[in-house]
Amino acid sequence: MKRAVTVLLDPAARPLGIMAAAIVVLALIDRGTGYFFSLGTIFSVMQLFATLGLVALGLGLSMLVREFDLSVAGIVGLAGCVAVMTGASNPWLGLFLGVGTGVASGALQGLIMTRLGLSSVGVTLGGLLTLQGITYVLTENRTISYPNLAVALKLNEPIADLVSVRSGVAVMVFVAAALVMTWTRIGRDVIATGSDRRASRIAGLNTDRIIIGVFAASGASAALAGVLLSYSLGAASPVALADVLAPAAAAAIVGGVSVGGGRGSPMGIAAGVLTLCILRSGLSAIGVEPHIHDLVTGTILVVIATVDAPDLARRLTVWRLDRAERWEKRLARSS
């Protein structure tokens, strides 16, 4: 019990602890049927990870610098539609233009925020609505089919019955992001900017450039998710993944990213995404109603918010110190 509490209180270990707990609970519920540990369920988890993971990564990167990129939901849809409309004969061209749309959108919003000193919530909310409007205009409010079915089949092709090409790409993006955040100066500068922007500026960091770069990376990650999903489905729709924002934010928070900035990692976000995907696929595999997934996710978020509350942390610290002091007095009396 004590070890479980320690894991819950440690933001670095918490994502893996929550994911492990979800697996254990679902395995106990599923005991005897074997549905949860089937290859089909694992493949389904990774397919969900391929889309939700890349969106959560983009959103999580913006949270690391104490901002919030609401526009990722709009970028997913627009990038997918741009790729489908331009990449019928050349999928790489559609990929380039789709991801480029995300990079340009993210960088422009970051530039507006830094130059005018505006809040990311207001700017990216406007960006979300603008991007959705552009998507509706481009598609004339209809689903656009993608005739190159060979690409769709290739992206969904199973590898060892566990992952697809699409989910494999998502995993590689997370690994690359983790390497950059852990081993490069860029990663250290991002964390420093999110921890204390004023102190970072005094130390000589160009925080405006970092924020613009982070929002460009956020747009690229969300756009890649939209392009890969649209290609794999063989179609793009202006309303596809319109509700991806809430699950992505939940995954980032479960993954240990602080809304106050300066804390979190790509691997933690990956663990948070996997936790939500495991819950969704696992609960579906054992026949639980879909709304139960939202209930479970909401409960986890409430627990995390409670544990991260500054007042609770202060009280726990006082309780530990008081307990240690009493223990020392007891030892002194016995000796």
Image (spheres, helix red, strand yellow):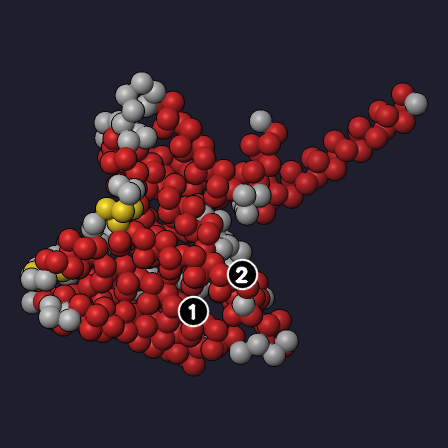
Residue 19 seen: yes
Q: Estimate the x, y position of residue 297 in percent, counting from the top left.
A: 36, 39
Which part of the image, by quadrant, shows the C terminus? top right
Secondary element at image label 1: helix
Quadrant into which the N terminus falls: top right
> In this rendering, would 141 be left or right of 187?
left
Q: Residue at x 25, y 32 (%)?
A: 284
How many numbered badges does the structure rendering display? 2
Examine the image and state in which quarter residue 230 appears.
bottom left
Amino acid type of the residue tagged 2 in the rendering:
Thr
Mark 2 neighbour class, 10 Å CA radius: few under 14, some 14 to 19, many 20 or more: some
List the residue tagged with mark 1: 214
In-image side of 203 versus 306 (left or right): right
Residue at the spot x=50%, y=54% of the render? 264
**Residue at the far front in the pictured view:** 160
Instruction: State which quadrant residue 330 falls in.
Output: top right
Query: Could one spot residue 98 in this view of the protein?
Result: no
Q: Which residue is mark 2?
A: 182
Give the farthest residue toward the top: 32
- Residue at the image position 15 percent from the left and 53 percent from the top: 153
Q: Amino acid at mark 1?
A: Val
| Badge 1 density bin: few <14, some 14–19, many ≥20, Cα 10 Å | many
| Disc 2 to disc 1, C-alpha distance | 15 Å
- Judged from the image, the secondary structure of the residue bearing numbered disc 2 is helix
Residue 88's tag is none
Residue 76, percent from left and from top: 25, 61
Q: Nearer the viewer, mark 2 or mark 1?
A: 2
Label whose residue precedes the other's in the sequence (2 or 1): 2
Which residue is depicted at the point 39% across and 74% down? Answer: 110
